């Protein structure tokens, strides 16, 4: 079955006021619209579009006939989102499968209400995630080499006014020298959130140093100063600003991706992208937010090792079709670009007139450009749907689907190793 689904964008303070409405073809509300969820996560399930006079969620659809609409008789192990990032998200990590199961069980046993502000684990699942940029995206992703961090701290200190605050930045750099990198990162995080005078002084120095643009810096350091300037404007005095210096600053062009496995510290700063993740909403925060921050638990589960490169490279799967497949069974993301015969106005080199996809498991898709025709000609009753920019489909498991038309479509499904588990 080809079933149109829809959802109301989630309104978070960091959302953009116009990016999602522009893509969905809806009128801006004046409020920030941050995330469009396209899945059956109980926190905000998508609904079947125009199905009945009453609202029917994707959960209802799957539970009405799990073998027909579910994944191996159950719910979707993945969640597809569109993120519209108008301001920095919180610094955060997600637990791995073992940590999530243990944390959820402990909070359940302790009687912590699932909707309590201090609740860390809303479910017992891990949450690896992958984001593909639709426009320019900036993000902080994973720990970088401490040599680079010390160099940036010293260069920032050189632009700060002389005094105790400036000295605190040099002290911060010294704290990241002369030992095991993971131990140094752990000790640095403890210091940043200790409540001692040093971190506050270092933050004042950063704020003073980045207040005005500095000439003569290389492109990478200029980008770091811009990111710090934006963070200090959005979250003045927040310890997460110091933590951000430990992380890679990544700029994604459209079509580029980052993959963040469980336990990787990260924060998205700006842009719009398609995101796929394991179907979980477990988040441990380390600052840049007004929400609950549990530093002790975050430091317990975070991966303190260096991440060589958070970028995740795409694989060509055929004419017009590419895929991003991390080493997890929960999800895979694909992108198809379609062109019509003899269409000279829209003919990117990586497009095709038709793309055929097997569908042994359900897929969730969203059209991000143009209009795409989705067909299942081998079904008992041939199925077809014309899907315009901003519209989404739920495709039940079954015969292969054919994509044609003129535009771009992202499709999420289970990982290629899912059937082997």
Image (spheres, helix red, strand yellow):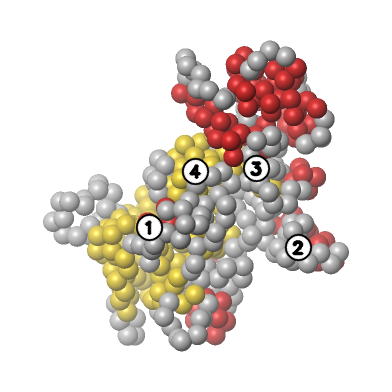
Q: Are marks 2 and 1 in contact (CB under 8 Å)?
A: no
Question: Can you give x and y, in whole percent of width and height, for residue 305 in the image?
Answer: 68, 36
Q: Which residue is mark 3?
A: 288
The relative height of residue 195 versus residue 263 in the rendered view (above or below) is: above
Q: Residue at x 51, y 81 (%)?
A: 56
Examine the rendering and report whether any part of residue 398 can be seen. no
In the picture, the disc for residue 116 is 2
Q: Which residue is mark 1?
A: 23
Question: Can you give x and y, in whole percent of width and height, for residue 20 in the image?
Answer: 43, 57
The relative height of residue 57 versus residue 37 in the rendered view (above or below) is: below
- Say left or right for 244 vs 196: left
State the separation of the CA atoms marked 3 and 4.
Answer: 14 Å
State the SS at label 2.
loop
- Say left or right for 6 vs 350: right
Q: Residue at x 45, y 70 (%)?
A: 6
Of label 1 and label 3, which has the lower sequence position? 1
| Front residue of this view, candidates 263 and 208 | 208
| Front residue of this view, candidates 206 and 222 | 206
Of label 2 and label 1, which has the lower sequence position? 1
Quadrant containing the N terminus in the rendered view: bottom left
State the SS at label 4.
strand
Q: Residue at x 76, y 62 (%)?
A: 116
State the separation of the CA atoms marked 2 and 1.
Answer: 34 Å
Say which quarter of the image contains residue 60: bottom right
Of label 4 and label 1, which has the lower sequence position? 1
Q: Are marks 2 and 4 in contact (CB under 8 Å)?
A: no
- Outermost residue toward the right? 110
Say which quarter of the image contains residue 181: top right
Crowdedness of circle 1 by 10 Å Cα count: few (<14), some, many (20+)? some
Q: Are marks 3 and 4 in contact (CB under 8 Å)?
A: no
The relative height of residue 74 versus residue 254 in the rendered view (above or below) is: below
């Amino acid at each position: 079955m080809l079933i149109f689904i829809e959802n109301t964008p989630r309104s978070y303070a960091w959302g953009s006021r116009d990016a999602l409405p522009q893509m969905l073809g809806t009128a801006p509300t004046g409020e920030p619209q941050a995330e469009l969820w396209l899945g059956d996560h109980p926190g905000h399930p998508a609904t079947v579009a125009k199905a009945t006079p009453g609202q029917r969620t994707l959960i209802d659809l799957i539970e009405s006939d799990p073998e027909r609409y579910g994944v191996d008789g159950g719910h979707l192990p993945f969640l597809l989102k569109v993120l519209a990032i108008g301001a920095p998200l919180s610094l955060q990590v997600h637990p791995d499968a073992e940590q999530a199961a243990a944390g959820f069980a402990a909070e359940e046993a302790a009687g912590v209400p699932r909707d309590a502000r201090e609740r860390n684990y809303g479910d017992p699942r891990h949450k690896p995630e992958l984001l593909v940029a639709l426009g320019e995206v900036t993000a902080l992703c994973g720990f970088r080499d401490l040599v680079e961090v010390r160099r940036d701290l010293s260069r920032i200190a050189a632009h700060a006014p002389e005094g105790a605050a400036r000295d605190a930045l040099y002290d911060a750099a010294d704290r990241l020298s002369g030992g095991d990198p993971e131990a140094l990162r752990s000790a640095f995080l403890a210091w940043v959130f200790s409540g001692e005078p040093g971190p506050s002084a270092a933050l004042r120095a950063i704020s003073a140093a980045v207040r005005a643009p500095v000439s003569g810096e290389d492109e990478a350091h200029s980008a770091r100063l811009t990111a710090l300037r934006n963070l200090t404007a959005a979250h003045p005095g927040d310890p997460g600003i110091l933590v951000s210096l430990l992380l890679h600053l990544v700029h994604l062009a459209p079509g580029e991706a980052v993959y963040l496995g469980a336990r990787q510290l990260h924060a998205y700063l700006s842009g719009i992208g398609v995101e796929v993740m394991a179907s979980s909403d477990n988040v441990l925060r380390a600052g840049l937010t007004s929400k609950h921050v549990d530093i002790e638990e975050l430091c317990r589960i975070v991966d303190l090792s260096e991440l060589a490169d958070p970028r995740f490279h795409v694989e060509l799967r055929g004419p017009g079709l590419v895929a991003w497949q991390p080493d997890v069974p929960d999800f895979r993301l694909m992108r198809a670009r379609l062109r019509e015969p003899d269409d000279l106005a829209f003919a990117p080199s990586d497009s095709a007139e038709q793309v055929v996809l097997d569908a042994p498991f359900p897929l969730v898709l969203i059209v991000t450009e143009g209009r795409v025709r989705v067909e299942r000609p081998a079904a008992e009753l041939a199925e077809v749907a014309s899907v315009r920019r901003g519209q989404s489909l739920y495709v039940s498991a079954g015969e292969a689907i054919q994509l044609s038309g003129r535009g771009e479509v992202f499709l999420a499904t289970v990982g290629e190793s899912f059937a082997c588990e």
